[in-house]
Amino acid sequence: MSQTITQKILAKHCGKKEVSPGELINCRIDLCLGNDITAPPAIKEFEKIGVKKVFDKKKIYLVPDHFTPAKDIKSAMQVKMMKDFAKKYGIVNFFEIGCMGVEHALLPEMGAIKPGYLVIGADSHTCTYGALGAFSTGVGSTDLAAAMATGEVWLKVPEQLKFIFTGKLPKWVEAKDLILYTIGKIGVDGARYMSMEFTGPVIDRLSIEGRMTMANMAIEAGGKNGIFAPDKKVVEYLKRHAATCRGMTLTASDPDAEYKEIYEWNISGIEPQVSFPHLPSNTKPVSKCKSVKIDQSVIGSCTNGRIEDLRVAAKVLKGRQRHKDVRLLIIPATQNIYEQAMKEGLFNIFLKAGAAISTPTCGPCLGGHMGILARGERAIATTNRNFVGRMGHPESEVYLSNVAVAAASAVAGRIVSPEDL
């Protein structure tokens, strides 16, 4: 039976030659992770199980990133619970302030994710790691607790979708626009509990960072996972970031693998995309957005807080000032990205433009802190969700875009393309 990348990885991890959509399987995991919101409930459930040790001290990652630096006593206690748990069970990979980052940028940067891995995380955007040819998906805190104890997870094999992108990226169109365009076409439930496989000549030319942006938002289409065939770019990325390339499995889908649906789009003529409130699927081309005034622009998150994103922001902002009525927040996703941006002089550009630069944090993306919206305020953001109240008051609004549009809009005071500056 012909198999997709996702099916091959799942089959390997459950000890079978092949698996079929809808089949329930029990898989061993290569890595699991939790953050400061999801890990504490998992820790409580783990203690109820009654085991004396975790399945592997080196394969559990605990990353406090959502409310850090701690915004209040409750959030500080959440991190302390994680820290105490890591000490008690000898968990190696706990990341405190100063060495942490936004989890889905941090783990790839550390070389922790490899092609062919099966990764689960108690965070819906764990699907990011499909950019490296891994099967990665979000789970609940109870599943994380069980995985920390047993090193296993049960899954239903998803149905398979294939997305083929042809043509050439127009100026100022980024990977973020490809995934927003996709979600706009199929809807927020168009890939519900399905594997989203991205391919085609446009995808081949994307950077690994761009692929992470797309895989990250598979969940916004309801996807179980997003995945890319690992290629030379993945190997080169891991040579730069991983201590060793051992354990890699470069898996490709069989040419005659079956898909529930195949979508093929020529994107040569698309504009940068903007998702209007209150769904990521409510997309419009940026040329249709010029009457939308904003109060805040957020550049960062696990979707678009990497160094190539900050370089794009700097390209747009250089020699320009933010609009007097707009708060501009820039959040590097990890300490290393923060340091690299400083070395390249990007911070000087941001500061001269009137931006506030934050230590790595999820912060405003989930309405946590570091940029909460008041009633009636609007933000454009490079984050991944724009649900009601996502970034603050239920009567605020969030518009999603790529980095270039978010930076240009901060200058104009309304949603525009860099072409309009």
Image (spheres, helix red, strand yellow):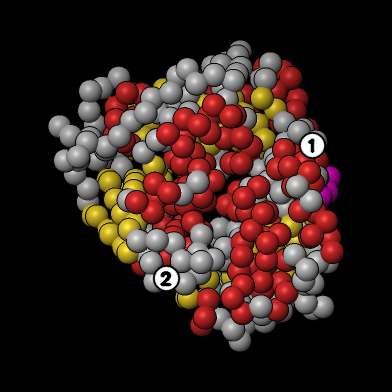
Position above or below: 389 against 40: below
Residue 304, percent from left and from top: 60, 53
Whether residue 351 sits left or right of residue 135 in the image: it is right
Residue type (three-letter) at the residue carrying disc 2:
Ile
Q: Nearer the viewer, mark 1 or mark 2?
A: 2
The magenta stretch spans residue 72: yes
Determine the secondary structure under disc 1.
Answer: loop
Q: Counting other residues with Cα less than 10 Å from the Cα at mark 2, is it few (<14), some (14-19), or many (20 or more)?
A: some
Position above or below: 387 against 203: below
**Residue at mark 1:** 97
Quadrant for the N terminus in the image: top left
- Magenta segment range? 70-75
Q: Which of 421 and 253 is in front in this view?
A: 421
Q: Which residue lies furthest to the top in this view?
A: 52
Separation (CA) of disc 1 from disc 2: 40 Å
Report if residue 243 is visible in the image. Answer: yes
Whether residue 339 sits left or right of residue 187 in the image: it is right
**Residue at mark 2:** 270
